Image: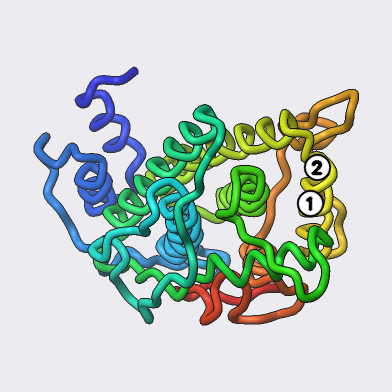
Amino acid sequence: MFGSRTVVNMIARSAEDGADRRRFLKSAGLAGLGAVGASAVGLDRAVAAGGPSDVAILNFALNLEYLEAEFYSYAVSGHGLADKITTGRGGRGPVIGGREVHFKSAAIRRNAWEIAQDEKDHVRFLRGALGSATVARPRIDIKNSFTAAAQAAGLIGPGETFDPYANENNFLLAAFIFEDVGVTAYKGAAPLINNKTYLEAAAGILAVEAYHAATIRERLYDKGLRGAARKISAARDSLDGTSDLDQGIGSNMHTNIVPTDANGIAFSRSAAQVLNVVYLTPEQKRRGGFFPDGVNGSINTSG
């Protein structure tokens, strides 16, 4: 849509300082057009109102991208991310679980493969943008956490297990847990980002996550998994506070592929609410669920 020179000019206009511009040009593969790589040291500036810095927000997003990228990578290929894109600040942990899904539908496999590539690209992009401030991949559980989530949602009973890799229906339900959370997380973070270059990048990732979420919701609807999706939605709602915002995928008569309010606007989650869902707890915690040792970075506590 835009030539490389146009992209350079757009980034140059929106960057708040030269170091931001150079890093984003480099991470976008445009460093050869006069840009020079730079470290992220000195760019972790706090928001004037005392909120989290832009770098802290992007590192929080990176933790979520690690989770999604590992889940989808294992599902489509049987292996996780390469070690070289999981290093950084904080404790680097292993991935518990994960294996290839034997998809019956070629279309769903194509969807899963595309999403996996996007999530890996998000990891690479954020790491490139953050430079030396990048956090490492924390310990991630994509095995036991799904059983806990399925039990909390009432999809299975006590003593039963939920294997997200057993078949494509289970895979879609597991993906549904992540995708809506990712969309609401990026929307909730957007007003907190000061740097226009970072904000533009976050908005671009938000758009991709929204496409992913709609794809998963549509596939679930077509497979008649409305009841299971409604239970997962209700479980997320029970974890992230008293408000009733989360929505299922529709009824027999109408789809609800895009969950919006009366104004056609998607809702937001704060970082604490997002961590409530991925830690699988309604309480204030610093670890649990999909992140047994917590996420890396200064934004790490659920609400």
In this orientation, which residue lies closer to the viewer: 164 or 273? 164
Q: CA distance from mark 1 to mark 2?
A: 6 Å
Q: Residue at x 35, y 71 (%)?
A: 136
Q: Residue at x 78, y 34 (%)?
A: 224
Mark number for residue 138?
none
Of residues 118 and 206, the one nearer the viewer is: 118
To which residue does mark 1 refer? 233
Q: Quadrant of residue 237?
A: bottom right
Residue 9 in percent (x, y) is at 25, 30
Left-right relation of 214 to 247: left
**Residue 194 in view of the camera:** no
| Secondary element at image label 1 | helix
Give the residue at x 37% y 59%: 80
Q: Amino acid at mark 2?
A: Gly
Other residues around mark 1 within 10 Å, as few (<14) / some (14–19) / many (≥20) = many
Say which residue appears at 68% left-offset and 31% top-offset: 218
Is residue 147 visible in the rendered structure shown here? yes
Q: Position of residue 58 (x, y in %)?
A: 44, 58
- 261 vs 171: above or below: above
The tally of labels here is: 2
For the N terminus, the quadrant is: top left
Q: Which residue is disc 2 drawn over? A: 248
From what the image shows, is residue 23 above or below residue 260?
A: below
